[in-house]
Image (spheres, rainbow, N blue to C red):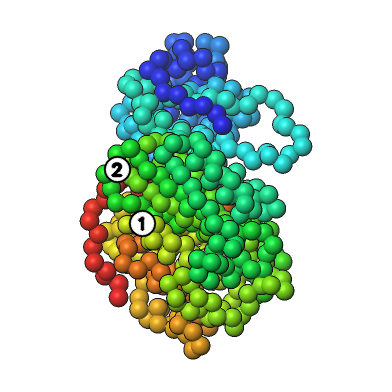
Amino acid sequence: MLSAAATTDAPQDTGADTIVIGLFEGQGISHDVEDGALQALVDSGEARPGLRKLAVTHALGKRYLLAGLGKRDEFHTERARLAAASVVARAKELGTRKLCWELPHHVDDAIAGALVEGTLLAAYEFTAYKSKAADGPRLEQVAISAHHDVSDAVHRAHVMAGAANRARDLQNGPANDVTPTRLAERARELAAEHDTVSVETMGRAEIEAAGMGAFAAVARGSIEEPQLITLRYTPAEASAPVLGLVGKAVTFDSGGISIKTRARMAEMKFDMSGGAVVLEAVGAIAELGLPVPVVAVIGATENLPSDRSFKPSDIVRAKDGTTIEIIDTDAEGRLVLADCLLHAREQGAERLVDLATLTGAIISALGSVHAGLFGADDAWCDAVTAAGRTSGELVWRMPLHHEYAKSLEGRYADIVNVVEGRKAASIVAAEFLRRFAGDVPWAHVDICGTAWNTGRPYAGKGGSGFGVRLLVELATMAPWTSTSPTTTS
Ligand code: BES
Ligand code: ZN
Ligand code: ZN
């Protein structure tokens, strides 16, 4: 990945071949070159201040990109990411190697971070499986030049975007390589990289022996070894409750016996996005040394049809003894997560957030702009919402209600895994999970619509890494305000 640096040197003195100057509506150029060459471009109307507008010129032996930022009072971190993404697209065409943004005057340091994030995320390419490398120069470095030291913001952004891009590598990798075993290996790599991170993994026999019958049922149909991955981050000094992160990592979801149709089934390699994001978020939290203890649980398995598969009408037993009648084997995520949530609680989680590509219905509800947020604890949901706003990874809270929970009551077992008619599918799925979170403040983030192909200029096609920045931001906000009693009954 490209490097990112903060500097108080003037852009021309940073060794950059391309310098980016932001342009606000109705405002001039702060530091011009060669007798007003940049301002002349503005005056002629070639450089326009509208967000994402770009103009190029040459001066002092360098390329200058004038990047429209819109109105100053409407400018915020997300706009900075979008502007940075436009610049990357043009910089690629221009053959830029070293890019330097001049930080606009009088903006928050968070803007410096957002410019770095937008640049690193937009510059991401997944080429691991291409036989021939693309030729021509490549973007190698982005620097942010400011009058004061913005290195903290730049470092944080570099860590967060780096982790998001690594999550995208896992997401984009094919299901025959990104198996549960590969995810467990990635967890071990993270533990090897950080003294503060440790890992434990359980395979099929251990998952079954531990009584995790819901998780085990999903894994039965595939010869691929499932993995229950527990990553633990123990900071030198902890000043917050133990943050429990839970991720769904179904490395391929065919639907199982309730098989999906062929259209777009290939996209179901992305059904491990929650797990990938949780893994890399732990890496980023450790890299930043945040004072928040974390226990992360990733449930990794395939969901395939075979003569060993679990079937509609089977009754399985989760680790807490809850019996679940399987109505539809394609509602497998909640089964995996049920045992993972129970495990996270057993491992000491005092707050819970799960990330999962759980229901297609959340795409109909919220598209790719917001992920669905579910939880009964207002203060905890507010914390997740605030982390979403700060990080630009937006979540929108959806309701829970005991009537949805009631619809899960079973005829043959305690509960069913799918309700007839599939009304309110995303909420019902969340109510299913809620049973396994117990009294621990819990938030469920349904990322089906935001995990891949979001159409965001800096995420584009393929895995988006959605959730890494959200989770790191949530950990940064610790110790969080005290949690409030349940308001949804
Ligand atoms: N992995 C899918 C959810 C999904 C669907 C993600 C489409 C991305 C795009 C999940 O396991 C699933 O199949 N959910 C079912 C639930 C239903 C059976 C209640 C769904 O959404 O159709
Ligand atoms: Zn499914
Ligand atoms: Zn699934």
* Cβ of mark 2 under 8 A from ligand 3: no
Question: What kind of residue is marked 2?
Answer: Ala
The residue positioned 72% from the left and 41% from the top of the image is: 129
Across and down, in percent, residue 58 comes to: 55, 17
Is residue 284 something that shows in the picture? Answer: yes
Residue under numbered circle 2: 238
Which residue is more in the foreground, 435 or 73? 435
Query: In the rendered image, which quarter is residue 289 located in?
Result: top left
Q: Reply above or below: 203 against 54.
A: below
Q: Residues within 10 Å of mark 2 (few under 14, many from 20)?
A: some
Q: Reply above or below: 25 against 225.
A: above
Which residue is more in the foreground, 368 or 383? 383
Q: Is residue 416 left or right of residue 24?
A: right
Across and down, in percent, residue 142 comes to: 50, 26
Q: Quadrant of the N terminus?
A: top right
Residue under numbered circle 1: 349
Question: What kind of residue is marked 1?
Answer: Ala
